[in-house]
Amino acid sequence: MFISAPTARSRSFVKAVTWRFVGSLDTFVLSFIIPMVFGMEVGKSAKVALSIALIESITKILLFYFHERAWARVPWGRADKVVEVAAKSADWEPPPDA
């Protein structure tokens, strides 16, 4: 069973910004390389655009997966790390039931 711990909003924001940077870098590289590979003129941009869209979809899925896995290793902003530290504390007691 998968249990999801809440994360800090700042963590989510930084993840969004870093992911967008990775995605934009991917688009730039693909847009630069694909026209050279096809050796096409500007007038055939539809084929180039379709190629970019298809390849970018695949690469962004893979990049997102590895980006998410990398962030899974970063303890900053994760609520489960706070609970883990509190549980190890000698003074820690579970909260009373309401």
Image (cartoon, rainbow, N blue to C red):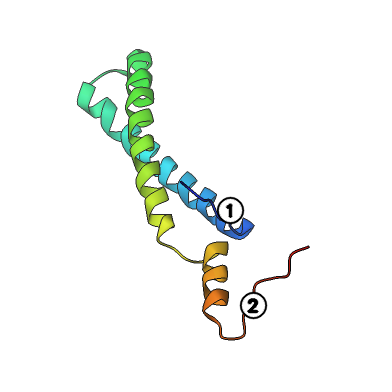
Residue 76 position, x and y percent, is: 51, 66
Instruction: Give the residue at x 52% y 71%.
Output: 84
Task: Tell me if I can see residue 78 in this picture.
Answer: no
Q: Residues within 10 Å of mark 2 (few under 14, many from 20)?
A: few
Q: Is residue 95 left or right of residue 65?
A: right
Residue 67 position, x and y percent, is: 39, 49
Q: Is residue 47 above or below residue 93?
A: above
Q: Earlier in the sequence, mark 1 or mark 2?
A: 1
Instruction: In this rendered view, identify the residue nearer to me: 84 or 24.
Output: 84
Residue flagged by tag 1: what amino acid is it? Phe
Q: Residues within 10 Å of mark 1 (few under 14, many from 20)?
A: few
Residue 25 position, x and y percent, is: 39, 44
Residue flagged by tag 2: what amino acid is it? Glu
Mark linked to residue 89: none
| Measured Cα–Cα span from mark 1 to mark 2 | 32 Å
Instruction: Give the residue at x 26% y 18%.
Output: 40
Circles 1 and 2: CB distance less than 8 Å?
no
Q: Secondary structure at mark 2?
A: loop
